[in-house]
Image (cartoon, helix red, strand yellow):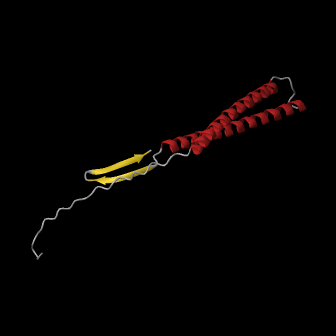
């Protein structure tokens, strides 16, 4: 070919064959452990909230005894009842706090387990003449 000459050249592109590798299987032990941990944490959270409610009821009963006029504020019985009411109130706060933490953790573990089950194992993005093709394999 010399300078100034032109030639027509046709280019043909072969489409790549898609990988036929199967999607990775989910580990049933991971799914079972996630579900069991989530259920245990949610159950513990509910139980701790119920225990916190019982401690609040105990606090209310002790406080009502303090304010009903049956004890002198300077008596040892008054001080003992006051200390018991304070301890029950502290217990209620702890139970509710730990119960809430357990509920949040249980929900997070449950959500993570669901994501593990439904999230695609393999994603491919291929360019095409008019755009792109996205392939997700579950």
Rendered view: 115 above or below 125: above
Quarter of the image that includes the C terminus: top left
The quadrant holding residue 12 is bottom left
Rendered view: 106 above or below 64: below
In screen coordinates, is 122 left or right of 63? left
Quarter of the image that includes the N terminus: bottom left
Rendered view: 119 above or below 80: below
Q: In terms of depth relative to the viewer, which is nearer, 66 or 47?
A: 47
Residue at the far left in the pictured view: 4
At horizontal 48% and vertical 42% (from top left) the residue drawn is 118
At horizontal 82% and vertical 35% (from top left) the residue drawn is 83
At horizontal 25% and vertical 59% (from top left) the residue drawn is 13
The quadrant holding residue 65 is top right
Q: x, y (%) of residue 7?
A: 12, 68
In screen coordinates, is 101 left or right of 123? right
Q: x, y (%) of residue 134?
A: 36, 49
Residue at the far bottom in the pictured view: 2
Q: In terms of depth relative to the viewer, which is nearer, 73 or 111?
A: 111
Q: x, y (%) of residue 113?
A: 55, 42
Q: Please say whether residue 100 is visible from this viewpoint.
A: no
Residue at the far right in the pictured view: 76
Q: Please say whether residue 132 is visible from this viewpoint.
A: yes
In screen coordinates, is 37 left or right of 82? left
Q: x, y (%) of residue 115?
A: 51, 43
Q: In terms of depth relative to the viewer, which is nearer, 98 or 114?
A: 114
């Amino acid at each position: 070919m010399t300078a100034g000459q032109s030639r027509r050249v046709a280019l043909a592109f072969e489409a790549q064959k898609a990988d036929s590798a199967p999607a990775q299987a989910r580990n049933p032990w991971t799914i079972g452990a996630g579900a069991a941990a989530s259920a245990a944490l949610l159950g513990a959270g509910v139980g701790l909230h119920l225990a916190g409610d019982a401690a609040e009821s105990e606090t209310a009963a002790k406080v009502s005894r303090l304010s009903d006029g049956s004890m002198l504020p300077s008596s040892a019985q008054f001080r003992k009842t006051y200390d018991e009411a304070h301890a029950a109130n502290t217990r209620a706060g702890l139970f509710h706090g730990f119960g809430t933490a357990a509920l949040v953790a249980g929900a997070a573990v449950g959500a993570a387990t669901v994501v593990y089950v439904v999230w695609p194992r393999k994603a491919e993005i291929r360019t095409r003449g008019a755009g792109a093709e996205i392939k997700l394999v579950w």
